[in-house]
Amino acid sequence: MAAKYPLVLSGTNIQELQSGDDLATTSITTGGSSTAGTITGNWSLTASSKLQATYADLAEYYAADKEYAVGTVLVFGGDAEVTTTTIFGDTRLAGVVSENPAYTMNSALSGTRANIALQGRVLCKVVGRVQKGDLLTTAGVAGHAAKAIEPKVGAIVGKALANKDTVEAGLVEVSVGRT
């Protein structure tokens, strides 16, 4: 006899599926907005199938010297794995702290940690004027980026996706991982 697996949708056990049965539905929610669900097993997407995300970046957790605000630019170093820098064009660049990544890796990392965007669109703390498409690097101001004057390999945060017309610090959406 095949094993049976209970299927719970929206908190109600609506049917039992046998191993190998198909499920057709347009929405499955686990735990609501306050509790994450899990997917286990081997999954594949067939032709014309896709997964979509509300948010726009891929991120990974790294051990951090302290808690950092969204948009903070971090480098590898410090007492943990990542910290801030005051070096303009620092080639130890790790990335930018993400707010709501579409996908997060290394989530089992414990302790003080920073979720760093590796690919996609994120807000970034920027000092100085930048134009859409400018390459950004670490600034002389801890945790911030600035327009790269002479870009160096390993020191590029990303490309600005918007203009910033003031010299004061502010947040700019940046495309990371495409430089």
Image (cartoon, rainbow, N blue to C red):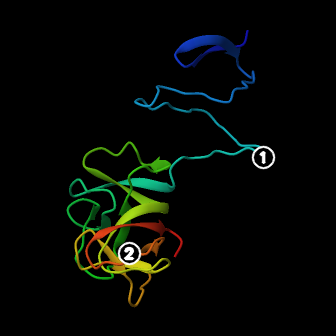
Residue 21, position as x, y percentages in the image: 75, 21
The residue where tag 2 is placed is: 164
Q: Residue at x 36, y 65 (%)?
A: 124
Q: Is residue 8 above or below residue 84?
A: above
Residue 146, position as x, y percentages in the image: 34, 79
Q: Is residue 64 above or below residue 161?
A: above
Dot 1: what SS?
A: loop
State yes or no: discs 1 and 2 in contact (Cβ < 8 Å): no
- 17 left or right, relative to 177: right
Q: Residue at x 25, y 49 (%)?
A: 112
Q: Residue at x 34, y 46 (%)?
A: 109
Residue 158, position as x, y percentages in the image: 45, 73
> Which residue type carries mark 1?
Ser
Q: Residue at x 40, y 78 (%)?
A: 136
- Report which quarter residue 178 is drawn in: bottom right
Quadrant into which the N terminus falls: top right
> Which residue type carries mark 2?
Lys
The residue where tag 1 is placed is: 48
Q: Is residue 56 above or below residue 48?
A: below
